Image: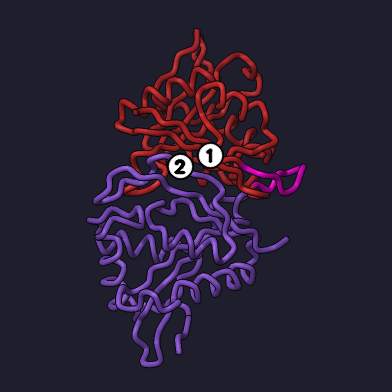
Chain colours: A red, B purple
Amino acid sequence: MTTIRPYQPADWAALWPLLRATFERGDTYAYAPSSSEEEIHRAWIEVPAATFVACDAAGTLLGTYTLKPNQPGLGAHVCNCGYVVAPSSSGQGIATLMCEHSQAQAVAMGFRAMQFNLVVSTNTRAVRLWQHLGFAVAGTLPGAFHHATLGYVDALVMFKQLVK
Amino acid sequence: MTTIRPYQPADWAALWPLLRATFERGDTYAYAPSSSEEEIHRAWIEVPAATFVACDAAGTLLGTYTLKPNQPGLGAHVCNCGYVVAPSSSGQGIATLMCEHSQAQAVAMGFRAMQFNLVVSTNTRAVRLWQHLGFAVAGTLPGAFHHATLGYVDALVMFKQLVK
């Protein structure tokens, strides 16, 4: 039984190693692999409008996501989300659960659409999952992601309208 | 004779009314039309890696642009720019001059590509100008801009590689 609930400061001790391990790989997120704990706390907790965590029945952290406006003012009706799943929980549908939760949460917060700005094209599992969940590839950015092992690879902008 | 030079703090007194007049229209930039002077100073001067102004021979401000990384870390080789031309100087090639200057400046700063995240589709003159200057429409974001008079309109992501 997976529960998704708002982040609480007491989660950070378990959340930071999970985020660090993900960003250190340099294959899915733009955050520099050498980012400090302070930088990531700011990006994942302080800047977003909301941060959530997914936990199992024992309270163990399985994943996390953030939600924020993608642009100021006249673009602030489109939100942006980021999702991270613990490697040990990969393939268990946690990303799907979190993405569906984030869409409901976004609508509840008044957003009309959701946009991902930099989906790494070589992260094919993520691309397929977002497409399965209703996101369209709005465009391709040539060489826009500097992959830690593959060098410059394309990134995708993905978009889903939540409110018609 | 138009000169483009780095912004200096003494420029703000002339720059702020120009930016305010542009953003107040709510037809080209996402900044809320009611944005405060402090918010726009932060967005146009403090956040960007560089801000430039275009002046005539008498030193009168004709336009301005900003340049910054579009993403952190592994996406920081792609820059983002924003351009504003004084209404009284419209149609005189100032935007072209600034965009060409910004591309040279971006390469000098080590950027490999330039991306515009939210080009308002109804701003057809800008879309045509960027295309003329080598930018491609990478994608269309449905209803991503809340135009002050037209309501929700599409926005374009535009992209140009500067270094092969």
Q: Identify the main secondary structure in magenta.
A: strand
Q: Position of residue A115 (x, y in %)?
A: 47, 37
Q: Quadrant of residue A37?
A: top right
Q: Which region of the structure is painted magenta?
A: A145-155
- Give left or right: position of B133 versus B161: left
Q: Please report the residue visible at 61 percent of the width from the left and 68 percent of the height from the top.
A: B109
Q: Nearer the viewer, residue A46 or A71?
A: A71
Q: Quadrant of residue B18?
A: bottom left
Is disc 2 surrounded by few (<14), some (14 to 19) or many (20+) residues within 10 Å? many
Q: Position of residue A158 (x, y in %)?
A: 53, 36
Q: How many marks?
A: 2
Q: Is residue A147 magenta?
A: yes
Numbered tag placed on residue B154 in the rendering: none
Is disc 1 surrounded by few (<14), some (14 to 19) or many (20+) residues within 10 Å? many
Give the chain of mark 2. B
Does A89 sit above or below residue A80? above
Does A83 sit above or below residue B26? above
Q: Are marks 1 and 2 in contact (CB under 8 Å)?
A: yes
Numbered tag placed on residue B141 in the rendering: 2
Q: Is residue A62 magenta?
A: no
Does A75 sit above or below residue A110? below
Disc 1 residue type (three-letter): Ala
Q: Which residue is mark 1?
A: A138
- Image quadrant in which the C terminus of chain A is located: top left
